[in-house]
Each structure stands twice: as C-alpha cells, then as structure tokens.
Amino acid sequence: GQSEVSRPHAVAIAAGAAHTSCLTRTGAVLVWPSAAPAPRALEVGGPLAGVRVVALSAGKTRTAAVTEAGAVYMWECRD
C-alpha cells in the first residue's frame, strides 16, 4: 500500500531509471514513479509500514532498503 504525502524532510535520496526514492528523517521511504502524470510522493507501505529505514539504494528499476533492525527489503518500480 502507498499513501500520498507532501513536503517530507529528506535525509537521503536514490534515483533509478524508473523512479526516485527518498528516505525521511522519520525513517519512512517515499517514491516518485517516473510514469506518474504529476510529481507526487507516495509512502512505501506493506512490510515497511511503521518500520524505520536507515539506508536505501536504487538501481534501474529496483530499490533496496535496510531497516534499523538490519533487515533488507527490495521492491521493483516500473513505468
């Protein structure tokens, strides 16, 4: 699940060919799909909902996140 957010306080960003990701100071991860008709941030939910992320990296279509507990999550963002 994803929810729309506005004006996050970013501490890190990562960009791929199909998306841009942002890590906020609260540990949430936001994504901007490149195919979106208007630039808007969507908070990544699912297994990361309520989990504090401390690092992220993006490739062409995938993003990887490391949580405060040391778990690694990966997902794909496509146009």
Image (cartoon, grey):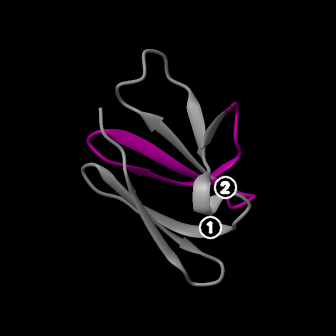
What residue type is disc 2 on? Ala
Total numbered badges shown on the rendered structure = 2
Sequence-first disc among 2 and 1: 2
**Residue placed furthest toward the top:** 37
Crowd class of label 2 (few under 14; some 14 to 19; many from 20; radius 10 Å): many
Instruction: Give the Cα separation between the discs numbered 2 and 1.
Output: 6 Å
The residue sitting at 31% across, 47% down in the picture is 16
Residue beneath disc 2 = 28
The quarter of the picture where residue 52 lies is bottom right
Is 17 inside the magenta-drawn segment? yes
Residue 2 x/y as whole percent? 60, 40
User: Which is more toward the observer, 39 or 50?
Assistant: 50
Q: Which mark is residue 44?
A: none
Is 73 located above or below residue 18 in the figure? below
CB-based contact (under 8 Å), mark 2 and mark 1: yes
Q: Which mark is residue 53?
A: 1
Residue under the point 47% across and 35% down: 32
Question: Magenta region: which residues?
Answer: 4-28
Q: Is residue 42 above or below residue 24?
A: above
Quarter of the image with the N terminus in it: top right
Mark 1: few/some/many CA within 10 Å (<14, 14-19, 20+) = many
The image quarter in which residue 47 lies: bottom right
Where's residue 24, x and y in %? 66, 53
